[in-house]
Image: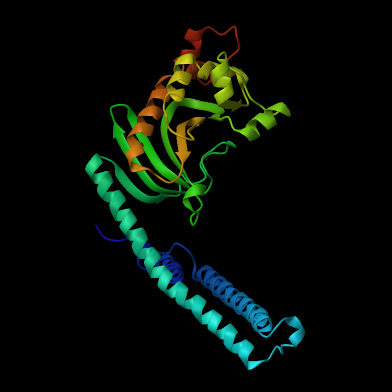
Amino acid sequence: MGTPSDEREPLALGILGGLHRSVREGGIPVWRALALGGTLLGLGLALAGLLGAGCYLAALLVVAFVRGGPDQGVSPDDPVVLSVALSMGLAILLLVAIGTPWHRRRLARHRAGMRAWSEANGWSYAPRSSALSSRWRARSRPASGHATDVLRRTGPRGEVASMTMGPRWGVDRWTRHAVMVAGPRRFPALSVTPMAGWDRVLRALGGQDIAVESHGINERWRVRCADARFAHEVLSPRLLERLDGAGVPGLRFLVEERDVVVHAPGPTALDQVGTLADLAFDLAALLPAYLPDDYPPFAPDVPRRHRRQAPSRAR
């Protein structure tokens, strides 16, 4: 399988090449491509200026410190200062020149491994997905940002997607491994998160925490939803038992519109993909069967059989 062009080209060349292809294919006019290219050039020059200024100030401090302190009267045009600043700049550029190909090769190896695993286990793989990026709005959503390492599979239980959510250049501790399946209807946002010390403080200060019948569940999980009735309908004893028994550290549960999502700390863990997928399917299956008839909600006097015949009729 070929390596995508964005894994081979430096970032700037990749952007310029993309602009050229867009103009050639009629996607954007020439003037807009020139404006974007000029903006990229201006940003590059600004970053170069900031790098040079930072190296120069650092060189002043280093030379003054080596000579005994700032009271030694280091001249701004001292050749030693300029030499140290130039050396710092060249060292940074050297690190970037070495680090960029290393990162590119590391990323290519990672994606090749993900593709090999997906092909061996019946999943499809995409390095990223703009449609899944920043998909959820609930405060307890998976880390906002880019969806990468997207795995999809369609089976007897339906379609499931696994992804790493987080900043494009973030470290592992800023990412979440999210697995989602589709529910039967667009529902209010409901989140169930592990109870932490900060959550107890917020609850004591009046922060939302919907209580269920089980005291143990209330002590282990924090429940937030704009519709308390919906939360109580969803969080049945069987669903809470399945969630509580999953045994995944840092696990969170989210229902938002049609998505039923479970997510755990860190990037995609291949040995957890199947476990989280089964969990997401189980939780979606445990949603009460009558909920699709009630959301959007109906007036209490509308018989349930009429709700099924006209599911779009709202209260």
Q: Residue at x 58, y 26 (%)?
A: 223
Q: Residue at x 67, y 80 (%)?
A: 65
**Residue 217: x percent and y percent?**
54, 20
Q: Nearer the viewer, residue 103 or 292?
A: 103
> In this rendering, is residue 12 above or below 290?
below
Question: How is the protein colored in the picture?
Answer: rainbow
Q: Residue at x 62, y 75 (%)?
A: 50
Furthest-front residue in this view: 68
> In this rendering, is residue 281 above or below 31?
above
Please state if 203 lies on the left or on the right of 157 as rendered.
right
**Residue 210: x percent and y percent?**
62, 21
Count every numbered label the image shows and give the total. Answer: 0
**Residue 171 appearing in the image:** yes
Q: Nearer the viewer, residue 191 or 1?
A: 191
| Image quarter hosting the N terminus | bottom left
Q: Nearer the viewer, residue 220 or 212?
A: 220
> In this rendering, is residue 10 above or below 114?
below
Please state if 202 lies on the left or on the right of 292 as rendered.
right
| Image quarter hosting the C terminus | top right
> In this rendering, is residue 34 above or below 249?
below
**Residue 313 appearing in the image:** no
**Residue 240: x percent and y percent?**
48, 20
**Residue 7: x percent and y percent?**
36, 63
Please state if 142 lies on the left or on the right of 56 as rendered.
left
Please state if 122 lies on the left or on the right of 286 as rendered.
left
Furthest-right residue in this view: 71
Q: Residue at x 74, y 81 (%)?
A: 70
